[in-house]
Image: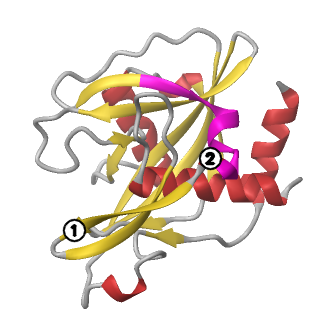
Amino acid sequence: MPDEIARLTAAVALQGGASSDFDLNPGMVPQGLTLRPAAVLVPVWLHDGAARVILTKRASHLKHHPGQVAFPGGKRDAGDASLQSCALREAREEIGLAPDRVQILGELPAHVTVTGFTVTPVLGLVRDAFEPVAQADEVEEVFTVPLAHVLNESRYSIERRLWRGIWRRYYAVPYGPYYIWGATARILRGLADRVARCG
């Protein structure tokens, strides 16, 4: 799949494009928001002639974002040498993906979340066979979505829900039974925009 790899490589090399949960809600930016560094892995799995994005469904008992679709990732720990190291560590812990199975293409623009994180998405390729192992206490399910689906800008919609008494708008890109929305959908939408710019 050289064409997909070339498009992703070109997309990650583009400058600019930072995003946030406030892009569609400019009046909701809290005063004095302290941002903590975090990273997620955007794993594109090249297997059996297809390119798919690996995602997780968070466990329903978690305090933060229960049941939501997310990339493997989390806050940067003191022992993480870099944000890429953070993303790879979290992917190993959450879905059993060994770091040496990932070819890093680069970092996408940071995304600021309403929960106070500045999240750096790390785009990586996963080749050949891979058997996910979900982290029992955090991950309810590991699943994949065709890369073509999330790179198709027409698949995205802007929806809204009531949050702390205020209507909050967000991107969504559903796939089958999976409702992909919020920061995860916004990061994927940013990637779709960049790939489109590369032609």
The x and y percentages for residue 122 are: 55, 48
Res. 131 in view: yes
- Which element carries disc 1, helix, strand or loop? strand
State the scheme by which the image is colored: secondary structure
Which residue is more in the foreground, 36 or 66?
66
For marks 2 and 1, give the CA distance.
24 Å
Q: Residue at x 10, y 36 (%)?
A: 61
> Quadrant of the image for the N terminus?
top right
Question: What amino acid does circle 2 point to?
Answer: Arg
Q: Is residue 151 magenta?
A: yes
On screen, residue 144 above or below 34 = above
Q: What span is in magenta?
A: 143-154
Question: What amino acid does circle 1 point to?
Answer: Trp
Q: Which mark is residue 155?
A: 2
Q: Is residue 163 magenta?
A: no
Answer with left or right where residue 20 lies relative to residue 18.
Answer: left
Q: Residue at x 42, y 57 (%)?
A: 183
Q: Are marks 2 and 1 in contact (CB under 8 Å)?
A: no
